[in-house]
Image: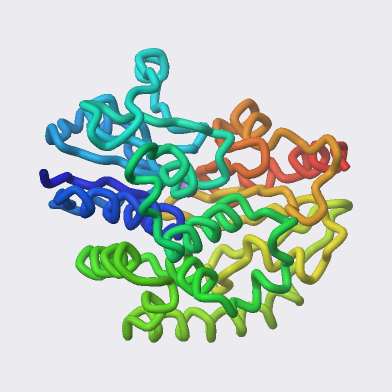
Amino acid sequence: MKYDIYYHENCLDGTVSAAVLKYFLNLRGDDFARYIPLQHPVDKNWWKGEKLKKTSAIVDILYHPGAKIWFDHHDTTFIDSEWAGSYKPAGKNLDDAKLHVFDPARPSCAGLILSSLSGAARSKIPARLREMTKWSDILDRVNPKQISVKDLLELKYPALKIGFFLDNENNISRSRQKQLINTLSKKSLADAVDLPWVKKGFLTCKKKFDESLQKMKEKLEIRGNTIFIENLERKLIGIRFAPYYFYTKANYSVRLVRHGKNFILAVGVNPWNSPKKPAEIGWFLEKNYGGGGHAYVGSAPFGSEEQARKALPDLLKYLNEHA
Ligand SMILES: [Mn+2]
């Protein structure tokens, strides 16, 4: 059987998830047909109306009842209450008519896939797949016990290189994404880094990042327990975690960025110095500004820079109350 594969692009976990699933499908003589990369935020109206082929698979992105195979761990995976209500866990392995698995407690979708498959498939997991899945687990919700901010930013390991490149390069063609997924399903992370366009793309990103780190030092503003950084012209890359390298004591960071017409306040908890009772970021942004996210990370869109800046004092006050 040939599956249409929908996956989270620009994301190490989304890419590894697709590769892991492909590996298991290949074992039984199946494969992917069309590759359909998706990015957050997915247009919900389009998704609701999308008629999936009978043999479709979705990994690391929004639930769709029409999929034969679906794995996800995002707690915002259901686009409305109708689909949230109709979802039922289904299946145990790839032979089942329907295999729908959701676990928001899982740090990565690739890890969820690997641990969900039972029976014969389980005994055939090669070490290289376990290795890339371990990295997905460490990086998708940065696990402070398994990686330091210094290691994360030094980008020495293949998984970090690929993840950083995917995070920061928005225009990877579909055929290259397909090649990367194929390589990961058959070979190791190190082999994937050796693909000429990955190697070159990473080096370009890395150079920009090194320049960003220099500029970042001057642009960071400390507001109590929170780092504020403005990146409206998108001259800086890699600013999600780098601020904590310069200011390890911060509990949170707030970034002001631009996304097309929208001005976005993006907020996150410092994984290496999270308060005992952290702020509920997604909830606060949803309630006050129509944004959303998880407990530890979220964002809210504003129609103008002025509106975003106006929201800032209250947001900072809330974060500073949760130290
Ligand atoms: Mn993920």
The residue at 79%/38% (across/down) is 278
Image side of residue 157 versus residue 284, left or right = left
The residue at 51%/47% (across/down) is 108
The residue at 55%/40% (across/down) is 106
Q: Quadrant of the N terminus?
A: top left
Image side of residue 317 versus residue 235, left or right = right
Q: Is residue 172 visible?
A: no
Q: Quadrant of residue 276?
A: top right
Q: Quadrant of residue 243?
A: bottom right
Between residue 277 and residue 293, name the one nearer to us.
277
Q: Is residue 163 visible?
A: yes
Between residue 123 and residue 80, name the one nearer to us.
123
Image side of residue 182 versus residue 231, left or right = left
The residue at 61%/83% (across/down) is 210
Does 79 appear above or below 163?
above
Q: Position of residue 122 (x, y in %)?
A: 39, 46
Total marks shown come to 0
